[in-house]
Image: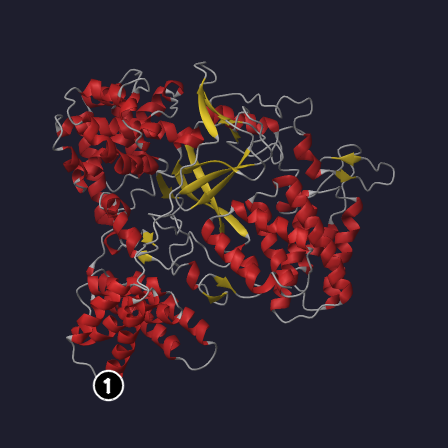
């Protein structure tokens, strides 16, 4: 079966199935199970899963090489840790990197892994990441291979971390353990220091443990069910809501990383020092032991799937599986007495059924979400149903998931059918209702890399202490990426408009809908399912919405006489032909954006649509080349000359001019960090560029947008190093813009503001 990839397997199985169209997911699954070729397909699924498991097993040579690599990386970390040259903090960061790489390289439950964790704990303690250092000590001991002769060292380290964390009970426990050990004079003295610390803590015992911040705010909104076929449920404001206020918030019930993004599988943290799972070859990570333990019940059912690289191949179906794993156990007690599979499905799938009135469980909201099953083609239905069945085979053969059904009245085979139907249902729902979560990401570290995985908090040369960025380095966080796919049932009730009334904020497992503008009482709350009217052509949006969501958008912006004006205003040129001089937009059809972004093409160019004269773009080629060599003032002055020159060619907030302005801003902060000095004239020109950059970004994306924050990161760097001065009112506006980014990144930005900007 190893000759088949995932798509080929499902395609082959689909060719064997002869079923008619079915009205429900359960009926489709039952029809497939009753097909004469179903036993063959099941055997194929089992054989294929076995083959990919075997293909991802390590051989003896691989295991030996991994151990040797882990030892080498740990020794490299030791060299940095003990280095007397250079900056101590940077040495500790580099040591932490190597130790983390050693952790990823090592085999689970080995001495190499134990020592890698223990040594990383040393570096993290020096970096003042005390909770992470404490967790690493626990991880080292969990391997059962940490050398007993070194046990006192790791216990002292745990005790020091417990002291700095003000954890009285843990410090007391570790001191009791050390009291039973034979220690030399140095360690005895350190224990005495810790005992004094214990006395101090006893007077200020901290009993409150910071709980995970779960948000559920919906008092300002309500759901209206119109009962109309073309409208369904929607959300309205129960009161007037001011721009920037939270309209509603929702806890993300389930999510999965996008393209292997380095994100904590439990709390969705991005800024972390990773703790991987070695049982699945380090393919998933956590930010802490606490998160690893909370997520254990889920990961025990996914570990083998990650090890086999199954989830890389199934796309949105992984989120469908994750929802079942997380949410089905929650409602199982409510249906445990049902002994009829059809009645059970009725309870789970019909919004008017009594089950929906029995509980406020999150899973009920998910089950009520729209599914476009009836609009799917039969081949698509068969395909997704077979994917669901494959995942049930995986659960049956490689996990103990179905053990939770033993106390119910249905047989396991019936639950396999139900779970298959539920996964199938969620696949259909998430094709239209899954939400992609976007986040700031560093420009100097690939968060989707499978090779570099030491974590954002251990990036070299940008940190000065935990969550504090070095002066002039905030621009490192000037990119955004989609990092996870999430299930948000309440947000999914919002209808689409190309001009949404909400701005999304994703922060860990919490989602916030921020008011994009003032909202009147009784007004409907709209989300945007694609690019907004300021960032796309109407026909392209409509085509996407029609294909994906099965509707033709008739929102206010799509019904305007000139629906593309708000987008095309960022792409207006003025012809340089002396006999023409007309304004034009370089596109010949409403669905052609290639010509609009000509500068992104190799040998791209632009011609006037009025007189057909090809425009001279040599200046742009020169501009890009000059960006590569900015060591001298002549090059920088020429860049400004070109930037000023194109004012009469690129109109208003032209998208290319915005891109050039951003390039100039980044150039100056990087040049400053490289030791360059600037003239007063240069700085005055730069101020004009920055003001344009701000105004243009706000005009196109709004103040509450990740796009604006990425520009803000560069501006704050220029303020921090003294190149740019910002009025207090402007700074206040910038601080408000931070409301749209996750709380962990907001902390970094606010620390930067306090460290370098607030009192300037």
Q: Is residue 375 shown to the viewer in this render?
A: yes
Q: Position of residue 39 (x, y in %)?
A: 16, 27
Q: Is residue 533 left or right of residue 238?
A: right
Mark 1 surroundings within 10 Å by alpha-carbon count, few (fewer than 14), some (14 through 19), many (20 or more): few
Q: Nearer the viewer, residue 140 or 521?
A: 521
Q: How many marks?
A: 1
Q: Residue furthest top?
A: 228
| Quadrant (top left/top right/bottom left/bottom right) for the C terminus | bottom right
Q: Can residue 66 be seen from the camera position used here?
A: no
Using the image as rendered, state which of residue 421 and residue 465 is in the foreground: 465
Q: Is residue 345 left or right of residue 273?
A: left
Q: Is residue 283 above or below residue 61?
A: above
Dividing the image into 4 quarters, which one contains the N terminus? top left
Residue 159 lies, in percent from the top left, at: 27, 70
Looking at the image, is 111 positioned above or below residue 532? below
Q: Residue at x 44, y 76 (%)?
A: 88
The scheme the figure's colours follow is secondary structure
In this orientation, which residue lies closer to the viewer: 586 or 253?
253
Res 277 → quadrant? bottom left
Q: Nearer the viewer, residue 132 or 189?
A: 189
- Picture quadrant of residue 102: bottom left
Residue that extends furthest to the front in the rendered view of this protein: 203
Residue at horizontal 23 percent and vertical 81 percent from the top: 188
| Residue 612 picture location, percent across and down | 77, 35
Residue 492 spot, x, y in % from top left? 43, 30
For disc 1, the marked residue is 185
SS class of the residue under badge 1?
A: helix
Is 145 placed left or right of 502 in the picture?
left
């Amino acid at each position: 079966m190893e000759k088949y990839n995932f798509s080929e397997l499902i395609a082959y199985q689909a060719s064997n199935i002869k079923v008619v169209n079915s009205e429900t997911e359960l009926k489709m699954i039952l029809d497939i199970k009753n097909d004469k070729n179903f036993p063959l397909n099941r055997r194929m699924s089992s054989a294929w899963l076995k083959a990919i498991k075997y293909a991802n097993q390590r051989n003896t040579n691989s295991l030996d090489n991994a151990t040797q690599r882990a030892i080498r990386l740990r020794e490299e970390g030791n060299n940095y840790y003990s280095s007397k040259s250079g900056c101590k903090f940077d040495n500790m960061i580099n040591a932490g990197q190597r130790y983390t790489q050693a952790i990823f390289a090592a085999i689970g439950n080995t001495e190499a892994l134990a020592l890698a964790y223990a040594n990383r704990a040393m570096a993290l303690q020096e970096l003042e990441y005390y909770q992470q250092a404490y967790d690493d000590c626990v991880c080292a001991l969990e391997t059962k291979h940490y050398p007993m002769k070194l046990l006192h060292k790791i216990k002292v380290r745990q005790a020091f971390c417990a002291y700095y964390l003000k954890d009285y009970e843990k410090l007391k426990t570790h001191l009791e353990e050390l009291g039973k050990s034979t220690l030399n004079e140095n360690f005895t003295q350190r224990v005495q220091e810790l005992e004094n610390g214990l006395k101090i803590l006893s007077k200020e015992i901290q009993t409150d443990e910071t709980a995970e911040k779960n948000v559920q705010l919906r008092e300002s909104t309500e759901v209206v069910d119109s009962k109309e076929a073309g409208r369904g449920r929607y959300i309205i404001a129960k009161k007037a809501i001011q721009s920037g206020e939270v309209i509603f918030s929702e806890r993300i019930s389930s999510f999965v990383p996008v393209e292997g993004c380095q994100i904590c599988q439990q709390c969705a943290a991005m800024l972390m020092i990773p703790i991987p799972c070695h049982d699945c070859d380090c393919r998933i990570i956590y930010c802490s032991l606490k998160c690893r333990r909370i997520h254990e019940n889920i990961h025990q059912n996914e570990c083998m799937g990650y090890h086999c690289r199954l989830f890389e191949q199934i796309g949105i179906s992984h989120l469908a599986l994750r929802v079942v794993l997380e949410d089905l156990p929650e409602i199982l007690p409510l249906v445990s007495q049902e002994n009829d599979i059809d009645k059970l499905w009725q309870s789970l799938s019909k919004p008017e059924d009594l089950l929906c009135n029995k509980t406020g469980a999150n899973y009920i909201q998910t089950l009520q979400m729209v599914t476009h099953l009836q609009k799917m083609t039969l081949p698509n239905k068969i395909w997704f149903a077979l994917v669901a069945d494959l995942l049930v085979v995986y659960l049956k053969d490689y996990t103990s998931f179905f053990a939770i059904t033993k106390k119910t009245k249905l047989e396991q085979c019936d639950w396999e059918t139900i779970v298959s139907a539920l996964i199938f249902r969620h696949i259909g729902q998430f094709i239209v209702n899954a939400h992609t979560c976007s986040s700031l990401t560093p420009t100097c570290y690939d968060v989707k890399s499978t090779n570099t995985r030491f974590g954002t908090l251990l990036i070299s040369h940008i940190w000065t202490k935990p969550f504090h960025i070095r002066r002039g380095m905030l621009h490192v966080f000037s990119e955004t990426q989609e990092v996870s796919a999430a299930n948000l049932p309440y947000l999914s009730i919002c209808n689409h408009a190309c001009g949404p009334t909400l701005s999304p904020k994703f922060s860990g497992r919490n989602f916030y809908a921020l008011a994009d503008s003032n909202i009147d009482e009784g007004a409907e709350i709209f989300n945007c399912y694609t690019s907004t009217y300021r960032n796309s052509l109407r026909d392209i949006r409509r085509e996407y919405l029609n294909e994906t969501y099965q509707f033709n958008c008739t929102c206010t912006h799509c019904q305007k006489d000139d629906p593309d004006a708000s987008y095309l205003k960022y792409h207006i040129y003025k012809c340089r032909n002396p006999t023409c001089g007309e304004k034009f937009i370089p596109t010949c059809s409403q669905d052609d954006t290639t010509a609009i972004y000509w500068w992104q093409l190799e040998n791209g160019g632009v011609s006037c649509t009025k007189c057909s004269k090809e425009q001279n773009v040599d200046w742009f080629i020169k501009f890009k080349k000059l960006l590569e060599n900015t060591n001298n003032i002549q090059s920088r002055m020429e860049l400004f000359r070109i930037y000023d020159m194109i004012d009469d060619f690129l109109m208003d907030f032209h998208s290319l001019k915005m891109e050039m302005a951003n390039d100039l801003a980044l150039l100056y902060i990087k040049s400053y960090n490289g030791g360059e000095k600037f003239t007063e004239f240069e700085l005055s020109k730069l101020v004009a560029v920055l003001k344009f950059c701000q105004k243009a970004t706000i005009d196109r994306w709004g103040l509450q947008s990740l796009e604006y924050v990425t520009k803000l990161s560069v501006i704050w760097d220029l303020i921090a190093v003294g190149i740019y001065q910002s009025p207090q009112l402007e700074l206040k506006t910038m601080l408000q813009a931070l409301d749209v980014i996750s709380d962990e990144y907001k902390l970094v930005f606010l620390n930067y503001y306090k460290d370098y900007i607030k009192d300037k």
